[in-house]
Amino acid sequence: MKSGNNNETKPTIKIIRIIVFSIMLLLFMSVVIVEYVDIMKIRSILLKILCVVCFLLIIILKKEPKFAAPRVTVLDVLSIVMFIGVMAYLGKALATSTIIQTAFQGNNGFVYSYSEGNGDKGYDDIEIILEYEMENIKKSGKYNELEEIYRMQVGEKIFVYCKVEGKILEIDFLRQNDLYYCSGSNVLLYDGIGSSDRYTTEETIRKDIANTMWRGVGLKEIGAPAWGVSDDEQIFSLTINSEKVDDVILIDEKDGKKYYFWIMTNLEEIETIDDVKAAEIHMGVR
């Protein structure tokens, strides 16, 4: 009886190890594809092929008798290596996020970017894909109603800003080969995060710059505008490194306070955390 149970257990353990290998391969290669493939259509095709390959791997490795324990052990080693690689990538992102959060303190909070499909399908009209992404966000249950407040294009990138329940949601799009793809989104929380007296306007602006430019995915500038929310009336005269704010609009008014959305481009000189710390921020009459 004991021997029989062992014989039944070994194939089950082998299958589990094969499935773990396939999952780790899927995660590892997904990170590589998303990180190094910039063309959205090719990225989408590669991700779909990867899913099919991983599924076929499970079937082939399970049915092929030649893959006995020694070869499965090789898969275990590869699984561990890929797991370390994925954890290192995520650790780097978390470390960058932690550095930004500890280096800069302000009245606004952030939820880092996520992707609805990560460029799974391209559309020939920005309005169609925007409506599609908004509906996906609503269906996810995160937000009920989205109100577009601002839109900016920087090169082939389009940034759409929506207001919802004390938050600003940025939805990012990329235009390639006459098609528009959604590359993710970023959320700023300006209501209920902290008292306006707790941090200065300048501290909040520095935090906004760091968060909106890096998204917590690494210290590299990704061509996005810097933006934020302030209840300081002098925000209309904001300059960063002598560059004037592109636009300021009133987005909310509650409890006697007015909240303003501000946005800026032309901040190429800001590439590192030290650059954010050293940035010259001015408002009002000088």
Image (cartoon, rainbow, N blue to C red):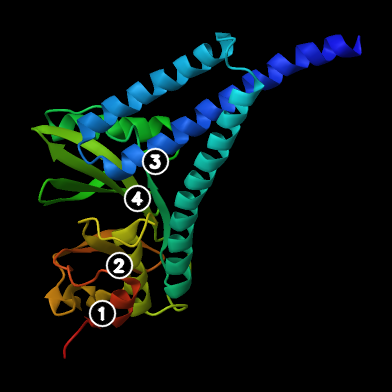
Q: Which mark is residue 224?
A: none
Report, in whole angstroms, how far the alpha carbon at label 1 lies from the one at label 4: 23 Å
Which quadrant of the figure contains the N terminus?
A: top right
Q: Which mark is residue 31?
A: 3
Task: Please indicate, yes or no, whether residue 38 appears anywhere in the rendered image.
Answer: yes
Residue contact between numbered discs 2 and 1, judged by CB atoms under 8 Å: yes
Q: Which mark is residue 279?
A: 1
Which quadrant of the figure contains the C terminus?
A: bottom left
- Give above or below for 5 relative to 204: above
Q: Amino acid at mark 1?
A: Ala
Report, in whole angstroms, how far the alpha carbon at label 4 lies from the one at label 2: 13 Å
Q: Which residue is mark 4?
A: 186
Please name whichever residue, 95 or 235, is drawn nearer the observer in this view of the structure: 95
Q: Position of residue 197 (x, y in %)?
A: 45, 79
Front label number (3 vs 2) = 3
Q: Residues within 10 Å of mark 3 (few under 14, many from 20)?
A: some
Q: Earlier in the sequence, mark 3 or mark 1?
A: 3
